Image (cartoon, helix red, strand yellow):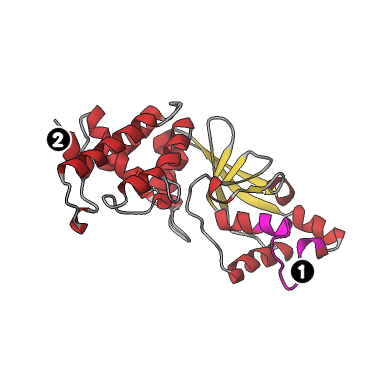
Amino acid sequence: MKIELTHIKIRDLVENYSDTAENGVTGYNGKLDIRPKYQREFVYKEVQRNAVIDTVMKHFPLNIMYWVKREDGTFEVLDGQQRTISICQFVKGDFSVEYQYFHNLTQDQKNTFLDYELTVYQCEGTDSEKLAWFKTINIAGEKLTDQELRNAVYAGSWLTDAKRYFSKSGCVASSLGDKYVKGSPIRQEFLETVLEWIYPTENDKESNPHKSIESYMALHQHDEHATKLWNYFQSVINWVKTTFPNYRKEMKGLEWGLFYNTHKE
């Protein structure tokens, strides 16, 4: 696996910065997914956010950030999301520090801020290498879930479409199956659940269910859409409702997909 140490100036980081809320946050002239679509939002408290800006203003070192390099040459922030967003929001004038917005700074102060170099490790390698590395560095701050880590590894057209069904707040999967599936779509728990269920329908399930999820995501990474996954989920939930018409709260969180795979005929 290749891990490259780089230094990124803030002026390059904030170029064409865009925050479209749940639809994602991008920067670095569109080449960096700071927060991908439908990922839960980590929000710094004011004191943490201001500390980041104060560190840069004083030219003290910020902690190392980690980016994963994708096959198309773009990047995704793996560690350092809140720091990155805090910096971009300050430059764009979303908040002030000590009663000063970015536009209140002198030109010299602005240039000093924009020329500050962030220390970034950029990683590229095989899927298994990247996943192992991500789990190793995911040890501090707001930890990513296992499925959020997988999403960083297997990014592509299929995942983008799957997250549209399973990872948005108020997504269609939640509307259909919230009474039967535990967890939060935005934390990727709906997506993780349906992936655990569907894998045995195409393969002999491995002993490690997480390996099964990774195998399925790798197999379909470059598919144009995730319609098959959505159709499968609908079939499971509709089967449950038909087979067990009298709902009880104990039904939430059961392995309905595995029951469906075995007993649907």
Q: Dot 2: few (<14), some (14–19), or many (≥20) neighbours within 10 Å?
A: few
| Residue 3 position in % (x across, y down) | 53, 40
| Residue 260 position in % (x across, y down) | 19, 37
**Circle on res. 100:** 1
Check contact, mark 2 vs mark 1: CB within 8 A: no
**Circle on res. 262:** 2
| Numbered disc 1: secondary structure | loop
Quarter location, residue 258: top left
Q: Dot 1: few (<14), some (14–19), or many (≥20) neighbours within 10 Å?
A: few
> Which residue sits furthest bottom?
98
| Residue 236 position in % (x across, y down) | 24, 38
Q: Which residues are magenta?
A: 87-103
> Which residue sits furthest right?
107
Amino acid at circle 2: Thr
Question: Image point 69% across, 67% down: which residue?
Answer: 54
Amino acid at circle 1: Gln
